[in-house]
Amino acid sequence: MAKLNERHTQILDLIKPSGFVSVQELSQKLNVSLVTIRKDLSYLEKEGFLYRTHGGASKNSTYAYEKNVIEKEGINTEQKQKISKEGIKLIQNNDFIILSSGTTIHYLARILEDFEKLTVLTSSLSVSIELCQKPNIDVIQLGGEIRKNSTSVIGAISESVLEQFSCNKLFLGVDGIDVNFGISTSNAAEAHLNQKMMESADKIIVLADSSKIGKRGFGRISSLAKIDVLITDNNITNDSLNKFEEIGIEVIIA
């Protein structure tokens, strides 16, 4: 077991309130040099107590790693269900909507009902199978290379098909939402397809539970300025909420 001195314990205590602390702040509060703090952070990261970031340290990793869709299905299920219920409130009869891949989007597809007429274009095989059971919903499944981890399609074929359509709304699932990096996913090809989806939609609605906030995936989709609405859960921090609203995003808390 790692041996922590008093300063190490103080560093961990300072991280807890917000989940992040800067090297400069630690140096000032603990009255030691920046070099000493950096050595402390390196040691604590090596022992698994924190994650080093640019200019500081965080309680959790800031990177979103690729997970199999089956594994994702069991994570934050209650939050995802609540988020999907808020998402359906933004859909109207006769809408033409795009549904991306992702487990939160799949939860939305499961409750898409009581519409007289709806047209859904999607990259997700799971979403298409779900919607095939609903007689008043027309489904357009994008073709292309199948990405097995997410049971969805990616690539040039799906992107070229997207160019033939214009839709009212895009409901987008993401792996990361970062104020500086924007929205992202763990797969670069999927990120590129998501960019094309955004170009084909009038309104961009991101569905993401609060665990995605502050995270970065490998593939950047866009800046936050291009998002119209973010639907998340009530574990979002006031700091994140204020930053998103300052950018001009309408934040709906499920």
Image (cartoon, rainbow, N blue to C red):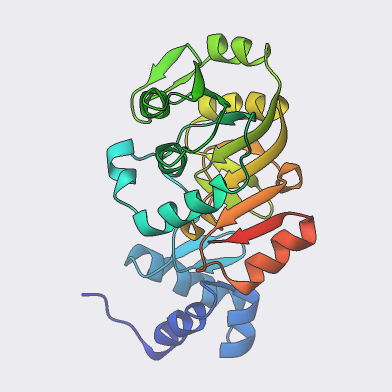
- In which quadrant is the N terminus drawn? bottom left
Relative image position of residue 142 (x, y in whole percent)? 51, 15
Relative image position of residue 116 (x, y in whole percent)? 55, 30
Res 108 seen here: yes
* Vertical relation: 206 (above or below) 42: above
254, 9: nearer the viewer: 254
* Vertical relation: 142 (above or below) 183: above
Q: Residue at x 44, y 26 (%)?
A: 124
61, 252: nearer the viewer: 252
Q: Residue at x 68, y 16 (%)?
A: 165
Quadrant of res 43: bottom left
* Vertical relation: 247 (above or below) 22: above
Res 31 seen here: no
Q: Residue at x 72, y 38 (%)?
A: 203
Quadrant of res 172: top right
- State how many labels appear: 0
Q: Residue at x 68, y 39 (%)?
A: 204
* Vertical relation: 22 (above or below) 152: below
Q: Is residue 250 left or right of residue 155?
A: right
Q: Which residue is situated farthest in the left direction here?
A: 1
Relative image position of residue 11 (x, y in whole percent)? 47, 81
42, 143: nearer the viewer: 143
170, 15: nearer the viewer: 170
Quadrant of res 238: bottom right
Q: Is residue 223 left or right of residue 235?
A: right
